[in-house]
Image: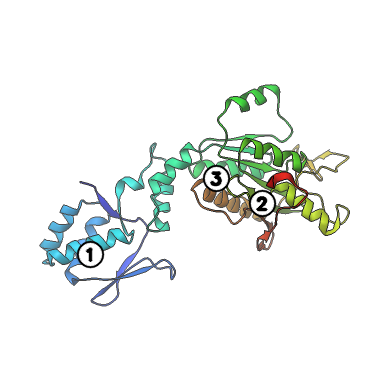
Amino acid sequence: MSTLRFVPGMRRFRRGEALIQFGVHEHRAKILVLPDPKLFPALTVFDTGRDPKGFRSEAKRHGADPEKAEAFLTVLQEEGILVDTRTLTTPGGPLTTECRALALRGTTTNAGHLMRTRAQATIDIEGQGQLVTTLLTELTGSGLTRTRTTATGARTQAQARSKQARPRPSLSILVDVTRPAGLISYGYRRRGVPYLVVTRMDGIVRIGPLVTPTTPDGACGNCVELRRRDRGGTGTIPPTFGEDTSTTSTRNEDGNRNGNGNEEELLERAVRSMAVGILTAHILTHIDGGRSPLIGATIDITPTGITQPETWTPHPDCGCQT
């Protein structure tokens, strides 16, 4: 017999004699009819976990109606308030807190299943700098333990052989990659690998587009570059993804390069933190099976916040739609 418990972190309290509320957020909280007031104290058995038989015994001890207790037990499970404890655990144990937090999403979320999906996913990050280092830490802490990084433009023959031997990634993150956008688009499309573009420029982090083989209607990274050129040309719009116009290179006291193209930009701590958080959320959305709003779109992370997504349509001169 399965052990049931309330979703961790969800508060509950009475609202009069006949109502009980679970949660406090106005868009997530649920108010249920309590069919028998005597059931309320019996619910405490699910704070740590108990099988249905134990709940029935506790309800009977408090003098609650057995049929009403059974009916309310069913309602609690259907609403996703009461869950099987096996869905709140994941092999290995250290990520239990993340797993339990996932259960707060709602009735259709099997937190344990999501954590197992993340553990099986393979993430490649191409790039360097503090943003990449912090992103790697956050992804690993969220359950994406099969994540590796490769410095931009630093591939060796050994790394190339390792890449060929490694399973095809579930998602590639390209941070300030300077290879031609058309070449990148073609390569990932041919391999059937989704990729997410990240560009640091002038103290701002631009995220997107996310390009996936399952959403062929979305613009790829090359489409975005072509659309930007149509707007005003590279002379009036700073080059970003897929372009490297720098002719000189200097290094700061940390050994990092400053400038344009493939050279690392300095970022305010708040901008970097926001960018890593937003990146992590969109990456996890994709891995968890959701649809990220960054498909065919970009957002900017600035010192004052996050801009609204800008949607891009496929460009007729790009071959990604053929």
Gap between marks 1 and 3 measured at Cα: 39 Å
* Residue at the far front in the pictured view: 322
User: What colour scheme governs how the chains and residues are painted in the rendered image of this protein?
Assistant: rainbow
Q: Which is nearer the eye, 224 or 122?
A: 224
**Residue drawn 12% across and 63% down?**
66
Taking 166 as reference, is 319 left or right? right
At mark 2, the secondary structure is strand
Spot occupied by residue 141 in the image (x, y as percentages of width and height): 50, 43
Q: What's the residue type where badge 2 is placed?
A: Gly
Q: Is residue 31 above or below residue 45?
A: below
Q: Quadrant of the C terminus?
A: top right
Q: What's the residue type where badge 3 is placed?
A: Glu
At mark 3, the secondary structure is helix
Q: What's the residue type where badge 1 is placed?
A: Phe
Gap between marks 2 and 1 measured at Cα: 46 Å
Nearer the observer, disc 1 or disc 3? 1
Task: Tell me the residue that label 1 is attached to.
Answer: 72
At mark 1, the secondary structure is helix
Within the image, what quadrant is residue 263 found in? top right
Task: Tell me the residue that label 2 is attached to.
Answer: 208
Q: Earlier in the sequence, mark 2 or mark 3?
A: 3
